[in-house]
Amino acid sequence: MIRWLFVCLLAVSFLQAAEFPLLQRLEKAKTGDYIVLEANQTTTLLAIRALSPRSIVLEEISAPSNVLKKKPASWAEWIKNKAPGHTSWSMVEIDLKDRQILECYSFSRSAWLTQSPQESLIATLLHLPLVPIKADKRRKIGSPPLDGEPDRRQIWNPPLIYNGQKLDNAIFDVYEAEWPRDGSELGGKTVCLYFDRDKHSPLPYWIQVETTHVTASMRAIDSGKNLPSRFRSLPRRVPEFVGAPVKTKSGLRLSLKSPKYYKEFELFAVDVTNREKQIYPIPHSLISGEGELITINVEASELHEMLQSGHKYTWLVVPVGYTESYTETPKPFLWTSP
């Protein structure tokens, strides 16, 4: 739960630019920026693998903390050696506009992951506003003063580890949010995030959740830049045709099940009548349905103009910007003009 809590809270931070200027911090962020966090006897490395105005891709590697009791001298070498001791290795993409986790692929399982019931709280997390905590409300060092005495205690800040070295006198800005009273274990609880003011990392160095009995925290044990990856990119699913094309009064309807990170599509009719295939772009309209369902409509006039009677065709769909993720109908159809 803590692992996914961090990913979701990170997405929240990106989306609350009016209340929390993390987007300004990301202007200086680079692919390869990383942070290593520890909580619940688990060590998790998070690295930025892609960043655009539309989405962010994070790589996440987790291992039991007792396995990594002696912190690797180099996280780059640890990854190069296939992260010895890791129990999970994945990439996740977060849509910064629609406030959704678009995709999660597990390299350790060689499979795309679907969300579990616990992860259904993501939609709630993405709508939580983050509010800055004033200095007089911050956690202090030492015992509170007696009644009537001024509070001269220093403000507490978490340790900041960068490239394996602790930086002295680090200053943090702190933000908090209250979890909605949704009947869950976290309902009504306060979540605090500590961000380095000097922006060594755009990601929080300390995450704290106040519960009835204990204070749960996730702390950064290292951070840095230019972290390499063994994987070039987040694997993408290929759109799938749902059922056979359907003739309508106005033309033709094709149904697809497609991941939401594909926003636009090109449609082609592939003439397979001759040995040398001919490919024709087909104008169409697109309608988004429930979940990942998409409907492609082609007007009859376009079919009559582009297709030749007596020829066999297949339909080819290519997501714009993802040419390697094309899909094609398995069986050709014979086109006959009315």
Image (tube, rainbow, N blue to C red):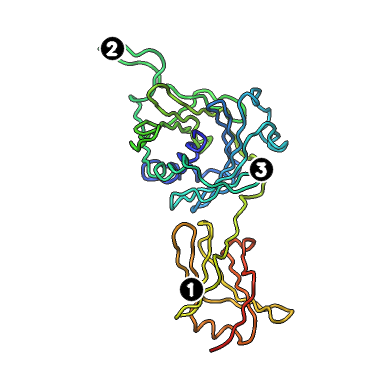
Real-space CA distance between mark 2 and mark 1, rounded to the nearest whole angstrom: 74 Å
* Residue 290 rendering spot, x and y as whole percentages: 44, 59
Name the mark nearer the viewer: 3 or 2: 3
**Could you tell whether 328 is left or right of 218 in the image?**
right
* Residue 10 rendering spot, x and y as whole percentages: 47, 40
- Is there a contact, CB below 8 Å, between mark 2 and mark 1? no
Dot 3 amino acid type: Ser
Which label is found at residue 229? 3
Name the mark nearer the viewer: 1 or 3: 1
Q: Which of the two labelled residues, at mark 2 and mark 1, occupies the earlier sequence position?
A: 2
Q: Where 70 falls versus 146 (above or below)?
A: below
Depth check: give the residue in front, 181 or 131.
181
Residue at 43 percent across and 52 percent down: it is 98
Quarter of the figure with residue 126: top left
Dot 2 amino acid type: Glu
* Residue 75 rendering spot, x and y as whole percentages: 66, 33
Which label is found at residue 63? none
The residue carrying mark 1 is 297
Real-space CA distance between mark 3 and mark 2, rounded to the nearest whole angstrom: 54 Å
Which label is found at residue 149? 2
- Is there a contact, CB below 8 Å, between mark 3 and mark 2? no
Dot 1 amino acid type: Asn
Q: Dot 2: few (<14), some (14–19), or many (≥20) neighbours within 10 Å?
A: few
Q: Secondary structure at mark 3?
A: loop
* Residue 53 rendering spot, x and y as whole percentages: 49, 52
